[in-house]
Amino acid sequence: MDKHHRNMDRRGFLAGVSALALLPQSAAAQSSVPTFADFAARCRELTGFDVLPRALVGELTSRLPSRDLAAVAGDDAGRDAEVQKVVLKALYTGVYGVGTDNPDRIAYPDALMYAAIEDAVNVPSFCGGVPGYWAERPEVT
Amino acid sequence: MRPLLTAFVLLTAVPQTVAAQSADVLLNCSNCHTLQSDSVPSPYPVLNGQPARYIERQLQAYRNGLRAHPQMQQTATALGEGAGAMARLYADAPVPDLQLRAEPSSQALSLIEDGDWSRGLPPCASCHGMSKDDEMRIAPRLHGQPGGYLAAQLRAYADGSRRSDPMGRMRAFSQRLSSEEIGTLADYYEAWRPSVETQEDRPDG
């Protein structure tokens, strides 16, 4: 083995050691996937709703890739604004993947857009009042 | 000097003790609203498994005066920021396994399943569920609730002393129910009891 090859070997060895040194970090990143409780707490923080239906958060959690869960509720440094928007859209509309080719409904009456306006607008198809209530002119106080 | 000191110590201690006891009583929710799913029915509403946002809204309603109950108004006020956590706790608590323990009246079943459209009454089940296992998401679960509580709430909606219903729906419906119908509906929902074997149920009991 000539000197050149020995140098290459040393480089290879150093590269290998460096790569190995990175492995524990990868494992740590893997383990930083937030728990359901942490993700739910982050969702409450993002939406401003102190109470979120478990079914809504649960369905979203089951669809989000681990990296996206970490990007929303992981360490501050790793948070991703775009993923947060995906989460907010899903929580408010009840559809995961709004604007994509494969939107997936995860909730209907639980969607936060209905909760935000429940004092004035009914969930479509749900009982909104006496029959024909919508035909009456609303009272003006 | 010693009696004076003793009196001073007692006087300063008493208000703190009273306040601490009051907080204990006010915030001990499970004292009335048990978290156990197989408990003996009580006069207090069952909160286990109710929609979390419904529970939170009711606590807000007590604080805002949209619902009236001396104890609950104080409790809701004392809970303050903790209302959301308490709502989540009860929403996630195990739901009682219920069985119908009495023959339902045809009047109750008719109102629950069909309503009475001639009076502008939709079926109760359209929001509150047809069966005990329906997953209610935004309206409260009525199966297994104490009859006295349900009747009192329907009357409170009818006379406007309870105004926590979104868009005034329950106020509108309750005003269209007769006293007899309110009693019949309350009896029906109360007849759903936890399926635990009590002393009375046992053959030798």
Image (tube, grey):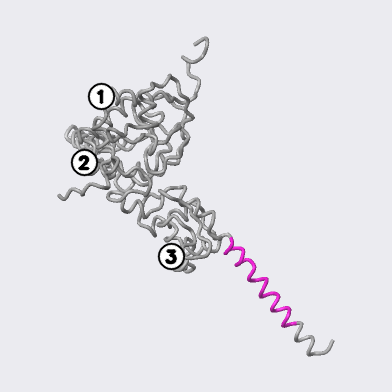
First-in-chain label (2 vs 1): 2
Q: Which residue occupies 35% across, 56% down?
A: A48
- Identify the residue at the far left of this view: A141
Measure the alpha-carbon separation of dots 3 and 2.
36 Å
Identity of the amino acid at label 3?
Answer: Lys
Identity of the amino acid at label 2?
Answer: Gly
> Callout 3: helix, strand or loop?
helix
Q: Which residue is mark 2?
A: B65
**In this rendering, do the residues under marks 2 and 1 share a single chain?**
yes
Q: Is residue B21 magenta?
A: no
Frontmost of labels 2 and 1 is 1
The location of residue B59, given as percent across then percent down, is: 30, 42
Query: For mark 3, does the 10 Å Cα neighbourhood hold few (<14), some (14 to 19), or many (20 or more) residues?
Result: few
Q: Which residue is mark 1?
A: B179
Instruction: Please state if A90 lies on the left or on the right of A133 as rendered.
Output: right
Quadrant position of the N terminus of chain B in the picture: top left
Q: Which residue is mark 3?
A: A85
The location of residue B156, given as percent across then percent down, is: 24, 32
Q: Chain of mark 1?
A: B
Instruction: Please state if A23 lies on the left or on the right of B21 as rendered.
Output: right
Frontmost of labels 3 and 2 is 3
Measure the alpha-carbon separation of dots 2 and 1.
25 Å
Identity of the amino acid at label 1?
Answer: Ser
Which numbered tag is attached to residue B60? none
The location of residue B117, given as percent across then percent down, is: 31, 34
- Identify the residue at the far front of this view: B118
> Callout 2: helix, strand or loop?
loop
Q: Magenta region's main secondary structure?
A: helix
Q: Which residue occupies 32% across, 38% down?
A: B27
